[in-house]
Amino acid sequence: MAEGPEPKRRRAEAGDGDGVAAGNGAEAEAGAGAGAGAEPGPGAPFPLSSVRLRRLLRDSAREKAAFVHGQVTGPSGEDTDAVLILEKTPFQEEKIEELLRKHTKLELQMANDIYSTYRLYPPPELSEIKTTVVYPATEKHLQKYLRQEVHLIRESWEDYKNITLPFIQSQSFSIQWVYNILEKKAEADRIIHENQDPSNGFVLVPDFKWNQNQLYDLYLIALVQRRDVKSLRDLTAEHLPLLKNILQEGKEAIVKRFGVPGSQLRIYLHYQPSYYHLHVHFTALGYDAPGTSVERAHLLADVIDNLVLDSSYYQKRALTFALRADEPLLKKFQEAGRV
């Protein structure tokens, strides 16, 4: 679905931004010294130095990010696609003085009265680039990060039943990475909070778009324990205890761990989501996170209020969302004469 860097899980949102990244955006360390032909095994560093650049899929001046299509040659000589998401990390206040003191070069670009512009070259240890790797990457991953025209869809409940839901059911969207987290087979050490109730519980984990070095771009994801709720469209009053738990316990866990109060959090769901397992986004209110546009984000508090008013609210109202030109779901809406 249309949006910013979402490697992720959050992944599949790797939405963008969607980032956790869609498909499965694993956070990888660059494998210094990995030779050509090396095939990364489970837990092994990705052989970044062996990647051959195929094309730049997209770049974003606002997000200071580049989305790259590369290939890695395996031991038997076959080429395997990879997507690399390169993001310049935010400044850390405690390192700014060190940056000014240790810069390797300073070039004057322009001077006019009291104003001047320079190009500053920091030392390597202060030039960190967050690198997210999707490997092996499929054609769907490549298309996800390719720059595309975007179309706005107004989906009625009938559209959902006749177009969107059959499309979702016909696709093989892998969300095994979600189940791995819920079952503590992966990322168990990253869990911030867990409610193990099978119906009304959830797991709260940092999104991979957040390196946890600063609070300005705080980003966490709540993944529900139950596996029968795909998206906003499935929600009814039955799910109010679950949603209220996420809202209350999520805020309490974040203020306890990070000192950020609920009044400084943006807590919302995406529609369409990047992956079809219900999840809720927690971001710092001052952070312009991918996917917070009005045509995609739905505040959790508003969702709760809507369901209190009408249990079938999201089975009645039309919902608006954006689709990229290459997305198969857009083609389905076009074939049905809805675009």
Image (spheres, rainbow, N blue to C red):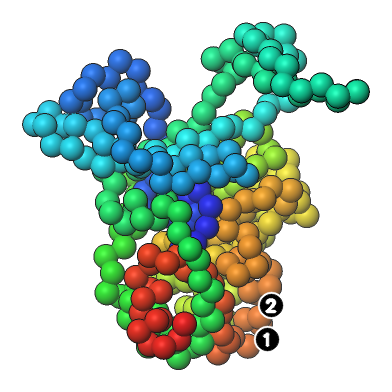
Q: Is residue 70 left or right of residue 288?
A: left
Tell me if residue 198 comes above or below residue 315 in the rendering. Answer: above
Crowd around label 1: few <14 · some 14–19 · many ≥20 (10 Å): few
Res. 305 mark: 2
Residue 100 visible in the current orientation: yes
Q: Residue, x 36% and y 76% (percent of image)?
A: 331
Residue 227 visible in the current orientation: no
Viewer-side residue, 57 vs 12: 57
Q: CA distance from mark 1 to mark 2?
A: 6 Å
Crowd around label 2: few <14 · some 14–19 · many ≥20 (10 Å): few
**Labels 1 & 2 near each other (Cβ < 8 A):** yes
> According to the image, label 1 marks what residue?
309
Q: Secondary structure at mark 1?
A: helix
Q: Is residue 87 left or right of residue 228?
A: right
Q: Is residue 292 left or right of residue 43?
A: right
Tell me if residue 141 comes above or below residue 116 in the rendering. Answer: below
- Residue 269, position as x, y percentages in the image: 57, 65
**Amino acid type of the residue tagged 2 in the rendering:** Asp
**Amino acid type of the residue tagged 1 in the rendering:** Leu
Q: Is residue 259 left or right of residue 290?
A: right
